[in-house]
Each structure stands twice: as C-alpha cells, then as structure tokens.
Amino acid sequence: MPRLYWSSILCCHLCIESGKRKSGADLSHVFCTKDAATVIKSYSPELIVHPVLDSPNAVEEIEKWLPRLHSLVVGPGLGREESLLKTAKEVIEKSKVRDIPVIVDADGLWLVTQQPSVIQGYQKGILTPNFMEFTRLYEALHHEPMDSGDRQRSVMQLSAAMGNITLVLKGEQDLITDGSRVISCSTEGSGRRCGGQGDLLSGSMGLLAHWAHAASAAGKLKSVNPSLVAAFGACSLTRQCNSQAFQRHGRSTTTSDMIHEIGSAFKKLFES
C-alpha cells in the first residue's frame, strides 16, 4: 500500500486522515518542525512524526525516507519562513528525481509563485490553488492581470506556462487541466465551504496520484493523463464527503465531519 509524506504543521491531520486511514494508504509520515511534533503526534497514535523540518540537516533526514514513500504532499501548514521553503524546494527536487507524484498546496504554492522552476514541467506534479493563489501564480508567470471572466482559458494558459503540469483551480466548480483540455468537476457539494477542505483534497489526491500512475505504468490507463484522473477523483471525493456531511449536520458541518464520510463516499463513487 502507498506511503505518503506531508510537510505540514497544524493542518496536517485532515490530509493524513483522508490519505491514509480513510482512503486506503498504508502509512503516513509527517515531517514537521520540532515545536509542532507533540501537537501533531497527539492527533493520532498512527502518525509517524519526524520533527526534523527545521533542523540543520533536514533535507538529509527526509531524503533517507524517500525510497519508502510513494507520494509527496507539500504545503499545508508549512509557513513561509525562508529556511523551511528552501528545505521544501530541495525535497521536491529529490522527489522528482525519484519520479514520485508531488501535490503542492497552500504555502507550497507560495514557493512555486516565487520559484516556478521547482515544479515546472514535472508531469507527476499537481497544483491545487484556490482563486487567490491561482491569481498570484498566474500574474507571476504572465506579468499581467488575469482575465477572471474566462477561467477555463486562464487555467489552460497557466498550465501551459508551467510546462503542462496538472492544475486544479478550486471553486464553485473545480477546473482541472493539463494545458490541453479542461475538465470541470461539479459534483454537488453543500455550499458550506468550511475551512480545511483543501487539506482533505490534497491528502486524498496524493493517494490517488500514486494509484493512477501505477495503473498507467501497468497499462490499465490508456490515452489519459493519470494526474488528471487522480485530480478529478480527489475533487469528486471531497465534494461527495461535503454533501453527505451536510445532510447529517447542516450549517454546523465542519471538515472533521467530512472525514467521517470518506469511507461511504469512496464506496459510492468508486466501488459501486
């Protein structure tokens, strides 16, 4: 079963629960700063926590684990401290050498905005920006304001500028593209956009990206981009969880409620 890596602090729990215990990954390794380790470990005894992210030899410590991992999710809770971003960049580069799927979200997208080359052209990379993050990244690459009236055209332009990397623009409809076509995921959610859903999305996407690329390598996915498949699957799963949780909890729905819906949502979407 796949083993995943999250670079995160307080937001990691949702990613880990969605990607590991709930969606079907085997183990979850959390690489974090020393101060965050106790809090993260207290979430669940199942988490494998490495408090090395702010150590002088952080890259070397993380690199030792890369041969055992099948996917990388970087960004949620990372922060924007220069030293942490530098470590994240080096870990991404080493993961690319190992041909590991890399999902970049939250503060990881801030890193990409500053240094697009860190993920540019990597076909197993997926970016998951919200509208504000997307706008910053678009304007950083194109050096001009984005036309918000034609989002499908804008996402294709940004993906192409990033070397046809898979891109998910989160919103009322999630727009997914690899620069050649746009897929819209409009699975009905609840309209309740509680905080933390992006962590659930990126966590499950890390898992599905490994599965999709493994299936492609085995000849089970033909004439389709595995990263697009993974992105669409994770978007659909997150929206289905949102819908089911809202049916139970109404306006009081939180992302923690959504996590409890992952098993039944996964079965409904992918196993029925």
Image: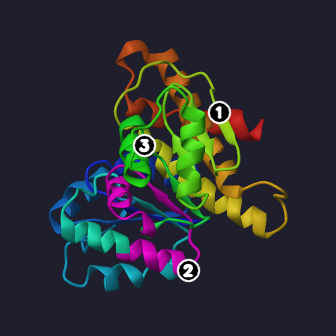
- Please rate how many residues cluster around mark 3, counting C-alpha atoms within 10 Å: few if below 14, some from 14 to 19, many from 20: many
Packing grade of label 2 (10 A; few <14, some 14-19, many >=20) is few
**Vertical side of 152 occupied by 191: above or below:** above
Residue in the picture at 51% in, 65% down: 120
- Check disc 1 and report the residue beneath it: 184
Q: Which mark is residue 236?
A: none
Label 3 to label 1, Cα distance in Å?
Answer: 16 Å
Q: Position of residue 138 (x, y in %)?
A: 43, 46
Q: Residue at x 55, y 63 (%)?
A: 26
Question: Disc 2 marks which amino acid?
Answer: Arg
User: Which residue does the numbered mark 3 point to in the structure image?
Assistant: 134
Q: Seen from this angle, which residue lies furthest front? A: 144
Residue 217 point in image, percent of width and height: 77, 69
For discs 3 and 1, the disc positioned in front in the rendered view:
3
Is label 3 in contact with label 1 (beta carbons under 8 Å)?
no
Dot 3 amino acid type: Phe
Examine the structure image and report whether residue 102 is included in the region drawn in magenta: yes
Q: Quadrant of the N terminus?
A: bottom right
Q: Which SS type dominates the magenta stretch?
A: helix
Q: CA distance from mark 2 to mark 3?
A: 27 Å
Q: Name the foreground residue: 260 vs 206.
A: 206
Please provide the residue range marked out in magenta.
90-117
Which amino acid is tagged 1? Ser
Please determine whether, in this image, residue 176 is positioned above or below residue 104. Answer: above
Judged by depth in the image, the label closer to the viewer, 2 or 1, is 1
Is residue 8 located in the magenta-colored stretch of the structure? no
Mark identifier at residue 98: 2
